[in-house]
Every structure is written in structure tokens, then in C-alpha cells.
Amino acid sequence: MTYTQTGDPTIREHVQAWQNLDVDQQLALFWFIYKEMGKSITPAAPGASTVSPEIAEGLFNQVKELSYEEQLQVQRDLINKADTQISREYGSLGDTTKLLFWYRLSQGMDNGTIIPVPSDYQLPSEAQAVFNRIIGLSFEQQITLFRDYVAPFGAEPKAGAEI
């Protein structure tokens, strides 16, 4: 069963299609979407009242300090819900803060502080098809899709001080 916040079957279908891609294709798709509509996402992600930008920024800064290979592994671990400290910290965030964290990762990829997608990378046909469908959604549907897509990532936080 796909986790999703919305009852909109279109959003659920898009989330499922995205999740059906392999992990690296999912990450590349995120990057291509950011490149296509990053400027329009900017006001939506940080503008929500439930966002804690300093928390998203703190987690981003932890990832930024890692090597490129470690940064890529962190992103894979989040999607795969691996039980790591960063994944557990991410799992404790609110959904909109999670979206802001991924937005910050995309910005970091854009400015070179986070491992970039190779400049000659082409989306495989399955990922391109999902991309084309997402671009066809309304802006509000896209934001809901992104939030619903990133919400289940990460590991469950542990009790007490273990995080």
C-alpha cells in the first residue's frame, strides 16, 4: 500500500508510479522536476506555516558536510527507509519540513554543495513518462504529490535520546 496524505486517486497514482522507479531514477526525477519548476516551488515549500526551516537547514547541513558518495548514500537511505541516524532524524520531521529538506538538497545540487546529477544524464523512458505526467498536473497537485512522495521516507525515530 502506498502511503499518501491525500485521498486524490490521481495523486496516489503518481506517487505509486514514482515509487516504482529504482532509487537512483527516483532521485534523478526529483532533480529534473526541481530544474523544471524549482522557482515556482520556492514560495510553496518554505511558506507553509508548519515548516521549521531551521530544522530542515540543520539536517541539510549535516548532509552537506559529507563526501559526495556519502551524500548520495544518505539520499538512497532515506528513500529505502534505512535505519541510520540521519534517516531517523528525517523520519521525525513534519511532512512540509521534509519537502523543504529535499528542496534544499536540490538547491545544493544546483550550486555544487550536494552531489549533482551528471550533466549528460538522461532520464530513462519510464522516469521520463512519470516526469511528463507530473508536469501536466496543476501546481497545487504537484505540491501535494511532492509532499506525499517524501513523507514516508526515512526511518522511524527511536524512543528517548537515541533518535
Image (cartoon, rainbow, N blue to C red):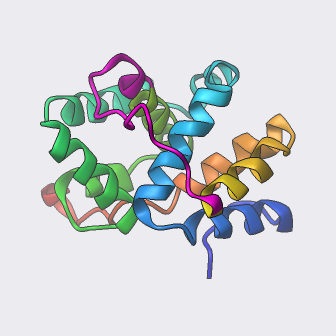
Please identify the quadrant where the C terminus is shown.
Answer: bottom left
* Quadrant (top left/top right/bottom left/bottom right) for the N terminus: bottom right
Q: Main secondary structure of the magenta part?
A: loop
Using the rendered image of the protein, determine whether residue 119 is visible from the camera's viewpoint. yes
Q: Vertical placement of 2 versus 116: above or below? A: below
Residue 36 occupies quadrant = top right
Outermost residue, bottom direction? 1
Q: Nearer the viewer, residue 109 or 50?
A: 109
Q: Residue at x 34, y 26 (%)?
A: 57
> Horizontal placement of 54 versus 41: left or right?
left
Towards the viewer: 48 or 122: 122
Kindly indicate the quadrant of the structure image that contains residue 5: bottom right
**Residue 62 point in image, percent of width and height:** 19, 34
On screen, residue 4 versus residue 52, left or right, reads: right
Residue 150 included in the magenta stretch of the image: no
Report whether residue 48 is seen.
no
Counting from the top left corner in percent of width and height, residue 59 is at 28, 36
Q: Residue at x 62, y 48 (%)?
A: 147
Is residue 63 depicted above or below 124 in this figure?
A: above
Could you say which quadrant of the image residue 156 lies in?
bottom left
Q: Where residue 27 appears, x then y in whole percent? A: 45, 50
Q: Which residues are magenta?
A: 107-125
Residue at 36% across, 67% down: 80
Q: Is residue 156 left or right of residue 152?
A: left
Q: Is residue 91 left or right of residue 94?
A: left
Residue 72 location (% of width, % of height): 27, 47
Q: How many marks?
A: 0
Q: Is residue 124 magenta?
A: yes
